[in-house]
Image (cartoon, grey):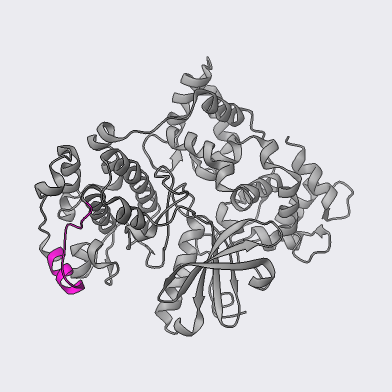
């Protein structure tokens, strides 16, 4: 259709061959695809939410589902260089690969002759930058709330070999006004994949937040940690550590790496906060990792958050415990509904449970983290055996952990997830030709992603759920097989 959809693979993270049904992995990014319809057919555009060099971000309303979204619109006439096009493709690939509660959710893409549209979740609270301007500086407990989520997000990115390269308050949104417990990291236009044993070249970032090694031209993922240090400094003081009248002066001061804690702004800030900043704004060899930063004593002293109620924890864990084994088709439908149909409000409570259980902040739950809460909340006598059973049911990508979407999918009340409205939207997603039934070819188109596969895989899925033996899945069969798990 254009330079993006026809010449570039949207998700380069799924290139393996699938020859057997059990080899198929349905991930949240599976459903983040280019919609072949015209953008205006699906969405109604609203007010501008911001602007950038290549376009703008606007409010959009999904016409049939009546759900609010944000859409990032890129003008093709300014995406003229190979580099600018590659940045957009990289941003798409990165966002498709991510599944973390503090990374903005991306839904789908559109392309027409003049523009490219990236549809994302709407964050009503605005930029963290605006909150800094309004408040001047944050109390330590508020700063700790923001930084814990940011370090968790950065740790997750780095564990998945991704560097953001432009961390700053303008790229951190609040889900709701004044809600510092639910931030979202956005703008992955300068993000890149990296090799653990290699370094990156090419200057990227914003003057105030850029790490000195980036200015010098050779760096690794630790550049994101420096940016986190600058953000923390600004949150606690209302001013940047490296100043200047223009970018050149700022960058020169960044290169020197010298900053102070003037008593005017820092007399009431704890020594632990200053120690953490010193461990972030320092040479790479001494700089903490994101995971190490999360374990700094400043968080245990300063972080104040209300834990989810016992009743909410118990309800989520019981849903996790009672989650049924799903066949591949049911898992695909529930993953689609969880990632594409549910609102932030629908998932807010179980996200709080997920964060509470994710003690090391890596964006996924280990057996050990599960075991702790199965013992404490449910008081199960043989908790280890129960956790092993839950892992087998819920860990559908078989990576040894329960990921964010896997947890949301399994811990929400299925009656709230599998509504007829959500099931109808899922059917429309699969029924690409709008014929009223789903064929093996349509399943392949939706679920194959970047993989190659044998047609037998898709015929086997049809065979599992096809009740009348006609080789396709109609709406009644679709509803019956999905609703059978309620």
In the rendered image, the residue lying farthest to the front is 134
Residue 385 versus residue 117: which sits nearer the camera? 117
Residue 393 % position (x, y): 60, 35
Toward the viewer: 253 or 63?
63
- Residue 439: which quarter of the image? bottom right
Q: Is residue 146 above or below residue 412?
A: below
- Boundaries of the magenta span: 238-254
Picture coordinates of residue 137 (x, y %)? Answer: 26, 49
Q: Is residue 365 magenta?
A: no
What residue lies at 56% left-to-right and 44% top-to-bottom?
A: 345
> Which residue lies at the image location 53% right of the left edge and 74% below the top edge?
8
Q: Quadrant of the N terminus?
A: bottom right
Front position in the image: 327 or 158? 158
Q: Left of 19 or right of it: where is 8?
A: left
For this orientation, the residue located farthest to the top is 381
Q: Is residue 280 above or below residue 171?
A: above
- In the image, is 385 to the left or to the right of 219? right
Residue 270 in sight from this viewpoint: yes
Q: Is residue 245 magenta?
A: yes
Say whether residue 397 is visible. Answer: no
Q: Which residue is at a point 31% across and 53% down the rendered structure image?
A: 132
- The answer to which of 23 and 136 lies nearer the viewer is 136
Q: Is residue 75 left or right of residue 18?
A: left
Query: How far across and down, in percent of the image, does residue 212 sit?
Result: 18, 63
The residue under the point 56% across, 82% down is: 114
Q: How many numbered tags mark residues here?
A: 0
Q: Position of residue 72 (x, y in %)?
A: 50, 68
Q: Quadrant of the C terminus?
A: top right
């Amino acid at each position: 259709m254009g330079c993006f959809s026809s010449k570039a693979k949207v998700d380069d993270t799924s290139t393996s061959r699938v020859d057997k049904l059990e080899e198929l992995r349905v991930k949240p990014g599976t459903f983040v695809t280019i919609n072949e319809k015209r953008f205006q057919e699906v969405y109604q555009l609203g007010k501008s939410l911001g602007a950038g060099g290549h376009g703008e971000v606007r409010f959009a309303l999904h016409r049939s589902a009546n759900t609010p979204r944000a859409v990032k619109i890129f003008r093709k006439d300014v995406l003229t260089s190979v580099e600018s096009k590659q940045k957009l493709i990289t941003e798409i690939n990165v966002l498709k690969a991510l599944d973390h509660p503090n990374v903005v959710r991306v839904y789908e893409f559109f392309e027409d002759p003049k523009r490219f549209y990236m549809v994302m979740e709407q964050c009503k609270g605005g930029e963290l930058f605006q909150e800094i301007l309004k408040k001047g500086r944050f109390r330590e407990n508020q700063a700790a709330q923001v930084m814990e989520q940011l370090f968790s997000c950065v740790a997750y990115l780095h564990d998945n070999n991704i560097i953001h390269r432009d961390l700053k308050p303008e790229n951190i949104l609040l889900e709701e006004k004044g809600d510092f417990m639910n931030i979202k990291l956005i703008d992955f236009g300068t993000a890149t994949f990296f090799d653990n044993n290699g370094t990156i070249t090419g200057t990227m970032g914003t003057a105030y937040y850029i790490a000195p090694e980036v200015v010098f031209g050779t760096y690794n993922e630790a550049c994101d940690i420096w940016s986190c240090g600058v953000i923390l400094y600004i949150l606690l003081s209302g001013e940047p550590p490296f100043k200047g009248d223009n970018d050149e002066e700022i960058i020169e001061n960044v290169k020197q790496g010298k900053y102070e804690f003037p008593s005017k702004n820092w007399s009431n800030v704890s020594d632990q906060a200053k120690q953490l900043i010193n461990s972030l704004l320092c040479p790479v060899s001494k700089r903490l990792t994101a995971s190490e930063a999360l374990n700094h004593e400043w968080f245990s002293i300063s972080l104040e958050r209300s834990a989810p109620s016992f009743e909410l924890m118990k309800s989520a864990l019981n849903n996790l415990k009672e989650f049924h084994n799903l066949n591949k088709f049911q898992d695909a439908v529930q993953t689609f509904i969880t990632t594409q149909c549910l609102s932030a409000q629908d998932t807010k409570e179980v996200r709080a449970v997920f964060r509470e259980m994710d003690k090391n902040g890596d964006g996924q739950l280990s057996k050990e983290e599960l075991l702790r809460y199965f013992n404490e909340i449910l008081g199960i006598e043989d908790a280890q055996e129960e956790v092993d059973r839950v892992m087998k049911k819920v860990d559908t990508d078989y990576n040894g952990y329960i990921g964010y979407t896997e947890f949301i999918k399994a811990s929400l009340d299925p009656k709230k997830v599998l509504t007829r409205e959500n099931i109808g939207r899922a059917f429309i997603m699969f029924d690409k030709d709008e014929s009223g039934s789903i064929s093996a070819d349509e399943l392949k188109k939706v679920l194959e992603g970047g993989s190659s596969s044998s047609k037998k895989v898709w015929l086997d899925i049809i065979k599992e759920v096809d009740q009348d033996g006609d080789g396709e899945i109609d709406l009644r069969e679709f509803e019956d097989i999905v609703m059978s798990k309620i």
